[in-house]
Image (cartoon, coloured by chain):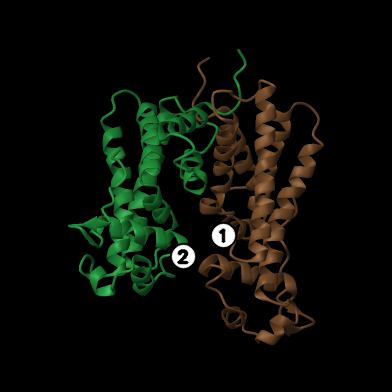
Chain colours: A brown, B green
Amino acid sequence: MTAEPQVHPRRRGRPGYDLESLLLVAVELFNERGYDGTSMEDLSRKLGITKSAIYHHVSSKEELLRLAVDRALDGLFGIVAEAEAVPGPAVERLEYLVRGSVGVLVDRLPFVTLLLRVRGNTKVERAALTRRREFDRIVADLVAQAEQDGDIRPDVDPAVTSRLLFGMVNSLIEWYRPRRSAGTDIADAVVKIAFDGIRVRAP
Amino acid sequence: MTAEPQVHPRRRGRPGYDLESLLLVAVELFNERGYDGTSMEDLSRKLGITKSAIYHHVSSKEELLRLAVDRALDGLFGIVAEAEAVPGPAVERLEYLVRGSVGVLVDRLPFVTLLLRVRGNTKVERAALTRRREFDRIVADLVAQAEQDGDIRPDVDPAVTSRLLFGMVNSLIEWYRPRRSAGTDIADAVVKIAFDGIRVRAP
């Protein structure tokens, strides 16, 4: 997991944006008004720079979207790669994947928020949905494997289990606020509740 | 929990809509394009009737929104009232509330989907958000009470526990498809996983 991207609103002493800070503002605007509902005109007004200054960095609104959703997806697939290297039974890799995914959500909150709202109206959105489905398939396969190992409860369909598991993880975009609690505390809470439930076990 | 609202696209033998079927089409359109992105013109085109035929049933687009989100909220608060009458410790009322909420989501899926996407730009939306917060407070209080009773794990902040619990429940709007599995099976799965976790307990 990487730290949040750094913002450099002023470069070489003059007002302006580098690609990174431009991207952050664009993502905020997309999340606020919807991608379809945001024009390059809106973005230029919000940034206080001309549209041609934006086109100096990116070729189109869709390129901003691609950069943003890839930031989220690259984070999640980075965790997939790390999880695959975790030794031991599948349930250990699943726990690593859940914990790491919460970390990516917390570190890249606006990017993951945008990703989870993508509907598939453009080529970039459809490509993002394809990668999301690939991620979901990896989770579902791990759950199914862990169930075969006898580590995950067999009385719920593994497809439903993996949906509920990531339903819990993804809900963070709706309510998690970085200032209130540390990302690692939230990751611990999700792992505890998802794997062992909210009920106190009888001694 | 009530059955899905009935659709009567033809009344007295002539093509037309009653309020109920008009509402269902409006909600589908709001969910597809966003409430802000849908005009009465769009709705009239989708229904194949004039705008004045729509205004025969409702005074405004906002009234359609109010009827729709109230359908969801009334369902959820109906479950709250039922849960309050459940005898025994708070954890039993919490379980009733979770199971019943899944039932409402499944029965009133398009209405709850719309409710969960409301952002608060209009008076109706702000009123809906106020009722949602009231519902969330009731859940959080039940979790806190059950924790005091020693029935819910004390090692996670009750506010976080209740967010994760309903994060799981609310995720149904993203992936649940009525044809694939029965609502009661899904409610059972949610209660099992939320209360006892996905991991098999050591004997």
Tell me if residue A88 comes above or below residue A98 in the rendering: above
Left or right of residue B87, residue A153 in this image: right
Pick the residue in front: A97 or B35.
Answer: B35
Q: Position of residue B171 (x, y in %)?
A: 50, 45
Query: What's the CA distance linking mark 1 and mark 2?
Result: 10 Å
Pick the residue in front: A185 or B169.
Answer: B169
Tell me if residue A198 comes above or below residue B177 in the rendering: above
Q: Amino acid at mark 2?
A: Arg
| Label 1: which secondary element | loop
Q: Which residue appears farthest toward the left when viewing the image?
A: B12
Q: Is residue A161 visible?
A: yes
Q: Which residue is mark 2?
A: B33
Q: Position of residue B155 (x, y in %)?
A: 55, 32
Pick the residue in front: A48 or A86.
Answer: A86
Q: Look at 46% across and 45% down and name the residue there.
A: B170
Left or right of residue B149, residue A79 in this image: right
